[in-house]
C-alpha cells in the first residue's frame, strides 16, 4: 500500500521535474528561468523526503533542509542581480 | 490505518506538485505562471512532508516533527521568491511598478513576454 | 524582564526551532536551546529597528488556522484553473491601498496574499501605501480588494496595533 503510494508520488515528482526542466530550457525570459529553477529546487526537496520514506532513513532530512535554503538564497541572489546589477550593495 | 493516511498524503502531495509544474509549463504569461509554483507546489511538498512525519512517527523511534521546519521554511520563503521574480519581470519590462496600470493586463496571448 | 527578555515570542520560536532541528527532547538539548533562545535576541536586538508591538498575541493562532485553511482552498482553486482551458482566464493587475503602518505587518500581509486564492503580490510602492497584486482570474476588482481588506488586513491591524 505504502510502497505503491511512494512510487506514484515518485512518478508525479519526476514528471514535474521534467516539466520544470522544459520551462528552464525554453524560457523565454530570464525571470521564467529563475522561476523554473526555484520550482526545481522545491521539487527536489520533495524527491529527497520521498527517498527518505522509501529507504526508511531520516538522514536525508538535513540534505532536504539545506537544499531548500540554497534554493531560496540563489533565487534571491539571481533576482537581485537582475534588479540592481549587483548582489551585495 | 496510519499507512492509509500516509499514502493519501503522499499521493495528494505528489499530484499537487505535478499540477503546479503543469501550470508552470503551460500557462501563457509569466505572471500567470507564478501562481502554479507558489501555491500548488508548496502544498504538494507540504503534503509529502506531512506523510514523512506520519511515517517516521509510526516507527518505534518516537515522534518525528522536524519535517515541520522544512514546511515552515517553504511557506515563508515561497511568497518572497514569487514577489521578487514578479518585481524582476516588471523591472525588465521597463518601469518601477508604476508603469503597470491597474486596468492593463488582460490575457496576453503568447509572445508578449519575449525579450 | 524587559531588559533580559526583549522579544519573548522570538525567544520561544528560537527554542522550538532548536528542538525541532535536533528532533529530540533530551534534557541537555532543552537546556542548551533555552540558553541560546535567551542569548540570541539580546545580541540581535539592534537589528530590529521598527519592532512591531503585539496587541493581541492570541489572535495570531486563529489567523494562522484561517491561513492554513485558505491555503488549502487556494490550491484547489488554482489546480482547477490550471487544468481548465487557459482561454477562460481573466488575469489582471490590481492596486491595493494599504492601511498598515508597520513594515513587519506589511510583510505578513504580502506573504498572505501570495499564498491565498488566485493572487500573487508583485510590487510594493515606494511610500508603502499601495501594493500591486496580480490575480489569476478576476470577476470584480472591487470585490477582490474588499475581500482581502476584510479577511486579512483587518485581523493584522488588530494583531499588530497599527
Image: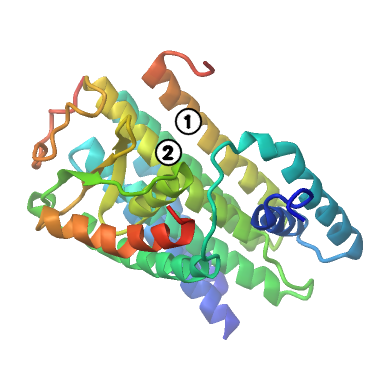
Residue A15 visible here: no
Q: Nearer the viewer, residue A6 or B64?
A: B64
Q: Residue B81, which numbered label?
A: 2
Residue A23, given in percent of the width and then of the height, sits at 32, 35
Q: Is residue C154 above or below residue C86?
A: below
Identify residue for label 1.
Answer: A76
The outermost residue toward the top is A85
Q: Chain of mark 1?
A: A
The residue positioned 73% from the left and 74% from the top of the image is B59
In the figure, B44 relative to A73: above or below? below
Horizontal relation, residue C90 to residue B56: left or right: left
The local secondary structure at tag 2 comes to helix
Q: Quadrant of residue C138?
A: bottom left
Q: Total of numbered circles in the picture?
A: 2
Q: Quadrant of residue C117?
A: bottom left
| Front residue of C38 and B88 | C38
Query: Is residue B71 rendered to the left or right of residue B98?
Result: right
Placement of A66 over or under C117, stated as above or below: above
Q: Position of residue C46 (x, y in %)?
A: 67, 35
Chain letter of disc 2 in the image: B
Residue found 46% across the figure and 56% down from its top: C161
Marks 1/2 in contact by CB < 8 Å: the verdict is yes
**What residue appears at the point 57 percent right and 86 percent down from the top-left corner?**
B1
Q: Secondary structure at mark 1?
A: helix
Amino acid at each position: 500500500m505504502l510502497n505503491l503510494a511512494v512510487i506514484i508520488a515518485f512518478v508525479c515528482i519526476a514528471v514535474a521535474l521534467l516539466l520544470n526542466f522544459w520551462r528552464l530550457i525554453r524560457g523565454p525570459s530570464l525571470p521564467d528561468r529563475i522561476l523554473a529553477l526555484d520550482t526545481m529546487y522545491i521539487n527536489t526537496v520533495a524527491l529527497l523526503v520521498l527517498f527518505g520514506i522509501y529507504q526508511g532513513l531520516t538522514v536525508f532530512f538535513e540534505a532536504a533542509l539545506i537544499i531548500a535554503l540554497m534554493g531560496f538564497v540563489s533565487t534571491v541572489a539571481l533576482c537581485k542581480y537582475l534588479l540592481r546589477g549587483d548582489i551585495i550593495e | 490505518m496510519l499507512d492509509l493516511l500516509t499514502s493519501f498524503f503522499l499521493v495528494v502531495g505528489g499530484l499537487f506538485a505535478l499540477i503546479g509544474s503543469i501550470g508552470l509549463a503551460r500557462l501563457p504569461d509569466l505572471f500567470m505562471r507564478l501562481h502554479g509554483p507558489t501555491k500548488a507546489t508548496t502544498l504538494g511538498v507540504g503534503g509529502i512532508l506531512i506523510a514523512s512525519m506520519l511515517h517516521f512517527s509510526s516507527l518505534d523511534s518516537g515522534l518525528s516533527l522536524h519535517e515541520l521546519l522544512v514546511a515552515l521554511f517553504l511557506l515563508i520563503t515561497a511568497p518572497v521568491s514569487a514577489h521578487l521574480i514578479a518585481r524582476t519581470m516588471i523591472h525588465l519590462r521597463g518601469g518601477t511598478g508604476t508603469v503597470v496600470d491597474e486596468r492593463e493586463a488582460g490575457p496576453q496571448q503568447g509572445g508578449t513576454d519575449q525579450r | 524582564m524587559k531588559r533580559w527578555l526583549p522579544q519573548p515570542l522570538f525567544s520561544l520560536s528560537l527554542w522550538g526551532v532548536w528542538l525541532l532541528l535536533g528532533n529530540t527532547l533530551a534534557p541537555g538539548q532543552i537546556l542548551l536551546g533555552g540558553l541560546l533562545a535567551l542569548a540570541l535576541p539580546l545580541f540581535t536586538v539592534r537589528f530590529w529597528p521598527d519592532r512591531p508591538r503585539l496587541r493581541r498575541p492570541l489572535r495570531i493562532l486563529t489567523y494562522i488556522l484561517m491561513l492554513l485553511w485558505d491555503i488549502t482552498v487556494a490550491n484547489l482553486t488554482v489546480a482547477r484553473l490550471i487544468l481548465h482551458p487557459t482561454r477562460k482566464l481573466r488575469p489582471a493587475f490590481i492596486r491595493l491601498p494599504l492601511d498598515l503602518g508597520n513594515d513587519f505587518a506589511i510583510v505578513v500581509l504580502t506573504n498572505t496574499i501570495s499564498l491565498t486564492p488566485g493572487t500573487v503580490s508583485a510590487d510594493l510602492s515606494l511610500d508603502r501605501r499601495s501594493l500591486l497584486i496580480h490575480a489569476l482570474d478576476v470577476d470584480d476588482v472591487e470585490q477582490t480588494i474588499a475581500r482581502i481588506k476584510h479577511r486579512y488586513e483587518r485581523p493584522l491591524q488588530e494583531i499588530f496595533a497599527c
